[in-house]
Amino acid sequence: MKIACRRFFFFVLWLCHLGVGLACADTYTLTVAEKSVNLIGTKQTAIVANDSLPAPTLHWREGEEVTLHVINRLQEQTSIHWHGIVLPYQMDGVPGVSFSGIEPGQTFTYRFRLKQNGTYWYHGHSGMQEQQGLFGALVIDPVHPRQKVERDYVLLLSDWPEADPYRTHARLKKQSDYYNFQKRTVVDFFNDISKRGFAETLSDRLDWGQMRMEPTDFADVTGATYHFLVNGQTPEMNWTGLFGPGDRVRLRIINASAMTHFDVRIPGLTMRVIEVDGQPVIPVDVEEFRIAVAETYDVLVEPKADRAYRLFAEAMDRSGFAAATLTPKIGLLAQMPTLRPLTLLTMADMGPMHGGGHAGHADHQAMPMSGMAEQPPDAEHAEHAAPPNHSMHEGHDASMPATQTEAEAPMRHTEAPAMGSYKVLSYQHLMAAAPNREWRQADREITLRLTGNMYRYIWSFDDIKYSESEPIRVKFGEHIRFTYVNETMMNHPIHLHGLWQYLDNGNGAYNPKKHVINVPPGKTVSVIVVADAEGEWAFHCHLLYHMDAGMFRKLIVEKREHAGR
Amino acid sequence: MLFSKFMAERFEYEGNDSLHLFKWDIKHWIGNDEHKLYLKTEGDYSADQGIFGRADLQMLYSRNISTFWDFQIGARRAFEPERTFDAVIGFQGLAPYSIEVDSAAFITENGNLLGRLNLGYELLLTQRLILQPRIEVNVAAKDIENRGVKAGVTEFEAGMRLRYEIEREFAPYVGFDYVEEESLREHHHSVRFVVGMRFWY
C-alpha cells in the first residue's frame, strides 16, 4: 500500500514537473533518510527526503486538504516545517515548540487545509538537518490563476558545506572569524592611504579597532567552506531551464540557504518582481535584488534574444556564487559574470553599536523608516539609493486613494506597467497588491533587540538566549507592533511561524506581508503582527547557527477565553 | 552545549649561540558560553643541560563577565625549578584595537604577590600570512628569597612571530624574542631566534 502510494506520489510529481497542471492528489509521503552524495568531489552524507537533494518540489492547490506522511528512517529525531504556511500550530513541525518531533522509525502525519497560494518551501527543523540537505520547494497553485506564463521554474538556492555542520558550529565557537578570508590586511591599509589619505585611513582603522570588529564581516560562514547551489547543482553542473521564442518565464526564487544572503541578477534581463514570500505585490521591475535567507521572490522575465542568459546569485559577502542558465537551446552558454568586489561595512551600518554613528535609537523612533531604504551596501548601488525611494514615497503619500484602484489593476491585467523600475530592489519598493482589510494601529508595541556577541559567537534576543528565555505571550486577536532593533553587525532574517508580519514600509494598508523580515546591521525595522492563530509558534533568526546559538523565542498566542484576563 | 578548544599558541625551538631551548605555551578549555574550565601550561626545557628552566600548570575557572572579557580564578602548580603552589586571579580577553590580553596575579603560600601580563596582536600581511608581535612581563611585589625572585620586573619578553596558516588550525612560524631576566642571583638579556608551530583543534 505504502509503495503504491509512493509510486503514485512520484508519478504525480513527475506530471507536475511536466507542467501538465494536473490536479495533484492530496496524500503525500516523504521518507527522510541518509544518503551518500558527491557534490564537491568527496563523498558526504546528506539527509534527504525521498532520496532527492533538494527534497522534491511539492505542488499543492489552494483549498486542498493536505495529508502528508513523514517517515523517519534516520538514527535521530527529525521534523519538517512548512515555511510560510498558515496552519494549526500542531502541524507546524518544530520539535519542542509545536510538537514532539518524529522519532527514528516513526511516521508522523501532517494534516491541514491550505488557505493560501504562492511559492514557499519546507525544511527540517531538527538539529542541522536543513544544512545537510533536508529542504525543498512548495508551490501552491491559486484557485484563480492570475499570471499566465509559458514557463514556470523553481530556483532553489542553497549553501552546501564541506564540513559536518556541527563541526562548523564548533569552529565558530572556538574562533568566530574562522571562515572570514577577506579581512583587512596591511596591503589594504597602504592602498587606503593612497586613496583616502593617511589621517582618514588611520581614523577608520582606529574606529574599527576600538569596536574590535571587521568591516568585511558580512557572513559568519562563507565560500571558504560553502559551495553555492541552484536546485542542488553547483555552477559547474549548471542547472538549465529552457524557454521558447517570446516566452514569459516565471522564476520562483527561494533562498533555502542555512546562512547565505544572495544578490540575484540575470545580466541582460529585467526581472519583474510579482510575489514576495508567496504574496502578490504590485509589480516592480528591477535589475537586481537581495534575497535574505528563507525569503522567496517570484519574478517574471521575458528573454527576447535568441541566446542564453545566466542567473547569477552572488553571496552577499562575495565569497562565492550560485549560477544557472536560461536558454532557448540546450548547449548554449552565457558568459559567467565575475564576482564584484566586496564593499566594506561603514560606521553608519554599525548604528547603535557605535556612539558616533548617525543611526542611533532616537533617529529610528522618530522615523522608523530610516533603516528600510538601505540598498545592498555595494558602491555601485549607492547612486541609486536616494532618488527612486523618494519619488516612490512621495507618490504614495500624495495619491493613496488613486493608487488603490490602480493597485488592483496590474494584477488583473498583467501587461500593465510595473509600479516602478529600479536598479536594485529594496523593501521600500514593496507594496501589497491588495489592501489589508485588517489594517489599523497596533494594540501593543514590543521592541525586540537583536543581540549577540560576535567575538564569542553567542546570539540572542534582548541579550537572553533561548535556553534562558520566557515565551512571548500575546492575546488572540491582538495587533502587535514588533520593532526589531539590530544591535549587531550581521543581517538577521527574522522568521515568525504561523503568523504574517506586515512590514511597516510606510504604505499603510498596502504594507506587504512577509514570513521573513531581514534586518540589516545597525538598523531598526517595524512590523505589525495580527495574532489570528492561537498556539505556540517559533520566532527566530533564520540563520541556522544564530538560531541554534540562541536567537530564538517561543511566541504563544493565548486562547480566546484567556484573552480577557 | 559544551565546546572545547586545545590551543598550542607556542610550540617551538628557541635559541642562539649559547642557548638551546624547547618552549611551549598551551591552553585548553572546555565549557559553554559563560563557564569554562581552563588548563594552561607553559615552560621551557634545555636539551643541552637536560633541565627545565620553568614549567607550570594552571587550572582555572573562567567566567564570562562582559562581551570581551573573562574573569579567571584557580591555582598554579609550578614543577620546575621549584615545586610551588600559588593561587591565581586574572582577566583574559580582547582589549580595544584587538589586543589580546592574558593577565594574572599569583599569590604565593607565604602571601607574596607576583604578576604576569601577556599582550598579543595580529597584523595580517595576507589572509594567511600573519605577523604577531607579543610582549610578556612578569613582576614581583617584593623579593622572595627561596625562589630567587627579585622585586620589580623579573622577566621581560618582547618578540615577533611570522606565521603562515596552512589551515586555520595549523600554522608554522619563525621569529625572534628579546628576553631580559632579573633575579637575585643573576641578570641577563639575550636575543633568540625562534621556529615553531601554532596548532589547535
Image: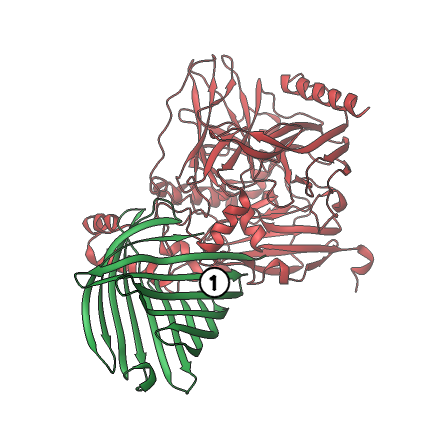
Chain colours: A red, B green
* Left or right: residue A170 compared with residue B144: right
Q: Quadrant of residue A423?
A: top left
Residue lying at 66% horizontally and 33% vertically, measured from the top left: A33
User: Which quadrant: the N terminus of chain A?
Assistant: top right
Q: Quadrant of residue A447?
A: bottom right
* Left or right: residue B69 compared with residue A67: left
* Extreme residue in the left direction: B17
- The percent position of residue B63, horizontal first and vertical second, equals 51, 69
Residue lying at 32% horizontally and 46% vertically, measured from the top left: B127
Label 1, residues with CA under 10 Å away: few <14, some 14-19, many ≥20: some
- The percent position of residue A180, horizontal first and vertical second, equals 39, 47
Residue lying at 30% horizontally and 69% vertically, measured from the top left: B136
* Viewer-proximal residue among B200 and B49: B49
Chain for disc number 1: A
* Position of A336 relative to A523 (above/below): above
- The percent position of residue A173, horizontal first and vertical second, equals 49, 54
Which residue was labeled with disc 1?
A361
* Left or right: residue A399 compared with residue A355: right
The amino acid type of the residue labelled 1 equals His
Residue A24 visible from this viewpoint: no
* Position of A251 relative to A377 (above/below): above
Number of marks present in the image shown = 1
Residue A132 visible from this viewpoint: yes
* Viewer-proximal residue among A489 and B113: B113
